[in-house]
Amino acid sequence: TEEEMDDLLDLEPVPQTPVFDMGTDTRTEGDAATLTVTPVGLQERRGSNVSLTLDMCTPGCTEPYGYGAQLSPRDQSAQEYLRQGTHILTPAMLHTRAMDDQSLQAEFYETPMNFVDPKEYNYPGLVRKNRYKTILPNTHSRVILQSQDEEDFLTTYINANYLKGYDDEERAYIATQGPTVNTVGDFWRMVWQERCPIIVMITNLEEKNEKCAEYWPEDTVTHEGIEIAVVTVTQEDDYSLRVFTLKCGEEERSLRQYWYTSWPDQKTPDKAPPLLELVQEVERAREEAPPSSGPTIVHCSAGIGRTGCFIATSVLCKQLRTEGVVDILRTTCQLRLDRGGMIQTCEQYQFVHHVLSLYEKQLSHTAEE
C-alpha cells in the first residue's frame, strides 16, 4: 500500500536488524549470514517480536561496556565485512545492476547495519536527547559538543556522527537526527562549533507524526548565544533554500539550508533527477564556501535513511567523475562503520543505484556533445 511504501522510505525506526547486531539473539550457534539475509518485508518485521526485543534494550539496563569491550565473534565479523566489502561497477555493470532487484536485495541484506547497542550509552537523562531510542551515534565518530563542564556527559552529547567523504576525506559530512524540541540549542551549538556552511534537510516537519522540529526562525532568534537571522528564502521546484546570518560574539558567518521536501513519495527512478540536482547544487555551494568551513550537515528524521542516500550519492558522483567507476557497496560499508544503519532500506539502496545510473548517462551524454 501507499502507506507501507512511505514507511519503507522513512521507516518509523524500529530498525530492521539491530536486534541481530546487539547480541540479544538467543541462538547459540547462529551464523551471522543466516541471521541477516532474510529479506522480509518491513511490515512483517515490525509486528514481530523484534520490536519487543528492542524495547527491552533501553539504555540504563546494564553497565556500558565502553571501549575496552571484547567484540563478540559476530560483531567482529560484521566489522570485518564493513571494512572489506567492495563491488566495483563499470558504467555498463551499473546500468544492468540498477535493474537487478534480486542481486541488490541479496547484497543489501548481507551487509551488516552496525547499529549501536543501547548499552553503550548508559546515562540518565539521555532519552530526551534522542528522537528514536534505538538509533544512536556510534561512539568513535560521534560529534562531541564543547561545554563549560566537560564532566557532564549530557552537555557534550548530540546524536550526530562525522562521516568521511570521497577518497577518505575526513569529516566531510555530519549526519544527525532531525532536531527535537529538546535538542534545538545543541544543534545550533554544533553548527557554530563545527563551522558548518551548509545544512541539507531531507524530511517534512510531519509525515503522519513529527519528524523534525522547526529549528530555524521566521526572521531572528537566539539559541545558546548564537543569533540566527534569515536573509533570504528561495523556493525551487523540489527544495527551498534559506540563507542565514549567524552571529556569536564579534564573529559573523553565513549558512545555507537546503530543505528538500519532495522525498516522501520517493519510490521510483523518476524521482532520481531532483535528488541528483540537489546533490550537485550542494556540491557547488560547498566549493564556494570559505576555506575555513567545516562539514556539511545532513539530516532527515533518524539521520540514517534518506541522509545515508544523500551522502552516498554525493560521494559516489565524485568517484564516478574521478575514476569512471562506482563502488556503492564500499561507500555504504564506509558510512555504516561511522554511523550504523546508513541507507536504511533495500528500496533506498536500489534508489541510490538508479540515481548513479542516471548520473552516468548524463555524464557520458555531455562527453559525447
Image (cartoon, grey):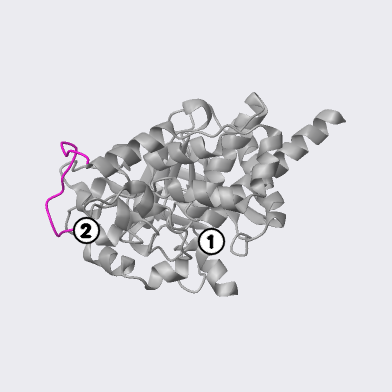
* Residue 223 showing in the rendered view: no
Among the 4 quarters of the image, the one containing residue 83: top left
Residue designated by label 1:
9
Badge 2 element: loop
Mark 2 Cα within 10 Å, few/some/many (few <14, many 20+)? few
| Direction from residue 363 to residue 285 in the image, left or right | left
Drawn side of residue 92 relative to residue 89, left or right:
right
Q: Secondary structure at mark 1?
A: helix
Which residue is the site of mark 2? 26
**Which mark is nearer the camera, 2 or 1?**
2
339 or 154, which lies in front?
A: 339
Question: Which residue is at 51% across, 39% downward?
Answer: 329
Q: What amino acid type should be assigned to the residue bearing mark 1?
A: Leu
Q: Which of the two residues, 33 or 185, is positioned nearer the viewer here?
A: 33
Which of the two labelled residues, at mark 2 and mark 1, occupies the earlier sequence position?
1
Q: Position of residue 255 (x, y in %)?
A: 53, 43
State whether residue 91 is above or below residue 53: above
Question: Which residues are the magenta region?
Answer: 58-71
Q: Position of residue 278 (x, y in %)?
A: 65, 47
> Which of 263/247 is in front?
263
Where residue 365 sits, quadrant-wise, is top right
Report if residue 61 lies within the magenta region. Answer: yes
**Residue occupying the point 22% across, 61% down:** 57
Q: Is residue 187 visible?
A: yes
Residue 188 location (% of width, % of height): 40, 49
User: Residue 221 — which label?
Assistant: none
Q: Where is 307 relative to 83, above or below? A: below
Give the residue type that dot 2 points to: Thr
